[in-house]
């Protein structure tokens, strides 16, 4: 099969935060389907990463928050952002997930270990750090009103942080028939009430998300951030509400098969899903309300391996199967027995020799093993090149995770579209490389392909700026503050200074008895 040449973002269909489109109500299908995307783009035709209205709103809120911080004494360098700045910032966020530098500022270091010309070609390091520090998703005035409602019914801990990414998850991809619901933990140790502890997860502390994912490819169809209680409690319990709130008939339609684990499975939930047109299957705890309590024809304690008992109660099928331990299932979708088999390694008790044998397996158990891993697959795809990092701001941690979800969903759409045309899709690494380069080219008069960028960067050296002292900020018009306003701490002696290196963007002292500017550059040259 011939290898595809460079793909544009329009081809890979990487719609991250769109909000304009409305999804039609439709039922589950045996194959995923794709809604058409209207390419009403920015000036460069790249409106497939962030909707232009969302980017403008993000710019407005970031600029308002920056003005508020500067009024409160923020001393960093700042210039109001424009839409191209946000796209360039997202480009470098994705690039950092690929480069895996210990710190973001390492991408601009001149040390030979960190000679990364791509980051320097997109924006200066101080500009990236300023946008990262002041990026804000909501209006600061609305935040003040919302903070006054803390502890009251009208309080919204997330604001509108998730609305755009959720709309995009629902708008551009219609999932396959089999879906699964499971938990996801975004690791953090921030001091916030939303943080949860889960001893069974690799990341014990973090934000808990209830996720609805496509079992076939890991596409995140919907998610809900758990804030300590259900947003719209029905009185049926958290496990009931978390599943029902993710299944939106207006978006999905009906006819889907939902797979859940024993935290969610209950007779009441499955009967409700059956009544609204969703089949369900999952492991179940025997102490749940609605589980059959009869001992007639029960599975004995000394039952042989693969022995099975089942009982049907209306649309509910309860199955108990003996493997290495008892497996108890509930389903409104399957028959108890469909002549399926599984392979197990068995040790002969007399000879001690291990051998492979085939055993019969109930249909609900086979289907559960096959379709329950959608959220785990999504987690794995995110972890390969995740953009998340340690941060003191809880909402920025979630924003980075939303970028991860959006990029992975876009990659899955790209993969599904090319496979439907019998063409070879890009790997996730190559997809992120193309995505980062094309976002970096937004606003450029002559965008370059990734191959051209890499080849030209090897041939052309950056024009040296030269290490000369400049002031950290513009001098204050107030004569009393001219010598003190905007001072930063010197990286060498940790005392406050008004000067920094023009090229290195590092604050350094220039005083008769403290020539940190010269000493620091001599140390860098020695390294």
Image: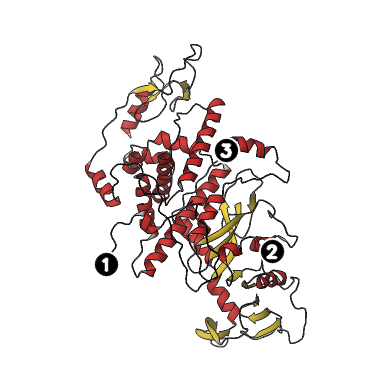
The numbered mark, 1 or 2, whose residue comes first in the sequence reads 1
Please name which of the two marks, 3 or 1, marks the residue nearer to the observer.
3
Determine crowd level at label 3: few under 14, some 14-19, many 20+ residues with C-alpha closer than 10 A.
Answer: some
Is any atom of residue 64 visible in this view?
yes
Q: Is residue 300 left or right of residue 126?
A: right
> Residue visible at 32% across and 23% down?
468
The numbered mark, 3 or 1, whose residue comes first in the sequence reads 1
Q: Which mark is residue 475?
A: none
Q: Which residue is mark 3?
A: 139
> Residue visible at 55% across and 74% down?
369
Query: How far is disc 3 from disc 2 in space, using C-alphas?
Result: 34 Å
- Quarter location, residue 108: top left
Tag 2 secondary structure: helix
Q: Which mark is residue 240?
A: 2
Q: Which residue is mark 1?
A: 2
Residue contact between numbered discs 3 and 1, judged by CB atoms under 8 Å = no
Q: Position of residue 361 (x, y in %)?
A: 58, 83
Tag 3 secondary structure: loop
Query: How far is disc 1 from disc 2 in space, using C-alphas?
Result: 49 Å
Q: Quadrant of the N terminus?
A: bottom left
Tag 1 secondary structure: loop
Q: Position of residue 142 (x, y in %)?
A: 62, 38
Query: How far is disc 3 from disc 1 in space, using C-alphas?
Result: 49 Å
């Amino acid at each position: 099969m011939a290898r595809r040449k460079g793909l544009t973002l329009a081809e890979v269909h990487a719609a991250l935060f769109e909000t304009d489109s409305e999804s039609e109500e439709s039922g589950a299908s045996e194959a995923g389907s794709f809604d058409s995307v209207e390419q009403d783009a920015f000036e460069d035709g790249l409106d497939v990463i962030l909707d232009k209205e969302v980017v403008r709103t993000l710019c407005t809120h970031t600029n308002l928050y920056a003005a508020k911080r500067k009024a409160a004494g923020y001393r960093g360098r700042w210039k109001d952002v424009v839409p191209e700045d946000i796209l360039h910032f997202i480009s470098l966020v994705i690039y950092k997930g690929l480069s895996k530098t210990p710190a973001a500022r390492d991408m601009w270091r001149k040390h030979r270990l960190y000679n990364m010309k791509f980051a320097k070609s997109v924006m200066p390091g101080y500009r990236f750090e300023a946008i990262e520090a002041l990026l804000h998703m909501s209006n600061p005035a609305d935040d003040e009103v919302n903070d006054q409602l803390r502890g009251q019914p009208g309080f919204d801990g997330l604001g509108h942080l998730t609305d755009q990414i959720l709309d995009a998850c629902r708008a551009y991809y219609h999932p396959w028939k089999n879906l699964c619901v499971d938990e996801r933990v975004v690791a953090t140790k921030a001091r916030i009430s939303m943080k949860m502890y889960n001893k069974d997860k690799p990341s014990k502390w973090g934000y808990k998300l209830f996720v609805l994912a496509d079992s076939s490819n890991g596409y995140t169809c919907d998610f809900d951030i758990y804030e300590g209680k259900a947003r719209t409690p029905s009185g049926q319990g958290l496990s009931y509400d978390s599943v029902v709130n993710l299944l939106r008939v207006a978006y999905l339609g009906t006819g889907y098969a939902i797979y859940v684990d024993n935290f969610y499975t209950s007779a009441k939930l499955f009967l409700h899903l059956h009544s609204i047109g969703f089949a369900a299957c999952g492991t179940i705890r025997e102490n749940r309300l609605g589980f059959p309590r009869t001992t007639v024809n029960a599975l004995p304690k000394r039952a042989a391996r693969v022995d099975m008992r089942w009982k049907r109660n209306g649309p509910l099928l309860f199955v108990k199967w003996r493997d290495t331990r008892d497996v108890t299932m509930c389903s409104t979708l399957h028959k108890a027995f469909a002549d399926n088999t599984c392979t197990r390694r068995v040790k002969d008790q007399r000879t001690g020799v291990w051998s492979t044998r085939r055993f019969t397996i109930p249909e609900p158990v086979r289907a559960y093993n096959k379709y329950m891993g959608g959220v785990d697959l999504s987690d794995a795809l995110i972890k390969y090149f995740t953009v998340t990092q340690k941060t003191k701001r809880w909402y920025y941690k979630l924003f980075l995770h939303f970028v991860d979800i959006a990029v992975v969903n876009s990659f899955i759409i790209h993969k599904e579209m090319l496979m439907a045309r019998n063409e070879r899709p890009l790997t996730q690494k190559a997809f992120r490389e193309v995505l980062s380069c094309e976002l970096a080219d937004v606003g450029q008069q002559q965008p370059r392909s990734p191959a051209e960028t890499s080849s030209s960067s090897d041939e052309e050296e950056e024009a040296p700026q030269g290490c000369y002292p400049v002031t950290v900020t513009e001098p204050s018009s107030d004569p009393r503050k001219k010598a003190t306003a905007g001072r930063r701490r010197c990286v060498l002696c940790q005392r406050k200074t008004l000067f920094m290196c023009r090229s290195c963007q590092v604050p350094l002292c220039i005083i008769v008895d403290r020539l940190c500017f010269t000493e620091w550059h001599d140390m860098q040259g020695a390294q």
